[in-house]
Image (cartoon, rainbow, N blue to C red):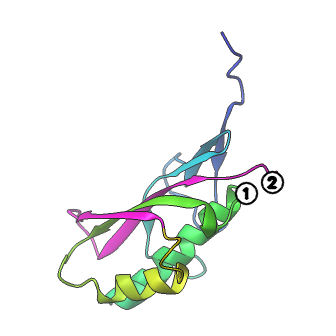
Amino acid sequence: MADTKNRRRSVIAEGLAHKFPVPNASRIGNLVVSGAIHGVDPKTHVMPQEMAGQCAHVFANMKAVVEAAGGTVEDIIKMTVYIRDRDNRGPLNDEWVRMFPNAESRPARHAQLLNIEGPALIQCDFMAVIGDRA
């Protein structure tokens, strides 16, 4: 049996640490899987009330998490978006195209209904495959 000590590495992005003892993501080898990424401003810890502001922070925070894991947004292979109002995808799609402008090289994406209490209108999680850069 292979030694699994320190095989898994917790990933914590500066300013985005959870209040619970849970990392932003976890990495084993070249695979990174995130937990929930919220639309909060990492500097002020305030969540904008409007969808566009939350979307901008969700994508910026996703970028910060994948970079803290040693990758880039080009390494993201799948993104799941949890959205409170599935008919309000305009701000989501704007940020999507901004982060992934090449239609020939975008991650897979799936949207689900966000069913939580609180001010969040959107959140996401992702999976990334990071090459040997470390």
Of all residues shown, which one is farthest toward the front?
104
**Residue found 69% across the figure and 15% down from its top:** 2
**Residue found 22% across the figure and 73% down from its top:** 84
The CA distance from mark 2 to mark 1 is: 8 Å
The amino acid beneath tag 2 is Arg
Give x and y (percent) for residue 108. 41, 62
Q: As rendered, which of 22 and 108 lies closer to the eye?
A: 108
| Image: magenta residue range | 107-134
Give x and y (percent) for residue 25. 56, 51
Query: On screen, 78 above or below 90?
Result: above
Tell whether 116 sits left or right of 125: left
Query: On screen, 9 above or below 81?
Result: above
Q: Is 121 in the magenta?
A: yes
Tell whether 22 sits left or right of 88: right
Proximity of marks 2 and 1: CB atoms separated by less than 8 Å: yes
Q: In the picture, residue 49 is in which quadrant?
A: bottom left
**Residue found 68% across the figure and 55% down from its top:** 69
Mark 2 lies on residue: 133
Query: On screen, 20 above or below 120?
Result: above
Kindly state the secondary structure of the residue where label 2 is placed.
Answer: loop
Mark 1 lies on residue: 70
- Can you see residue 128? yes
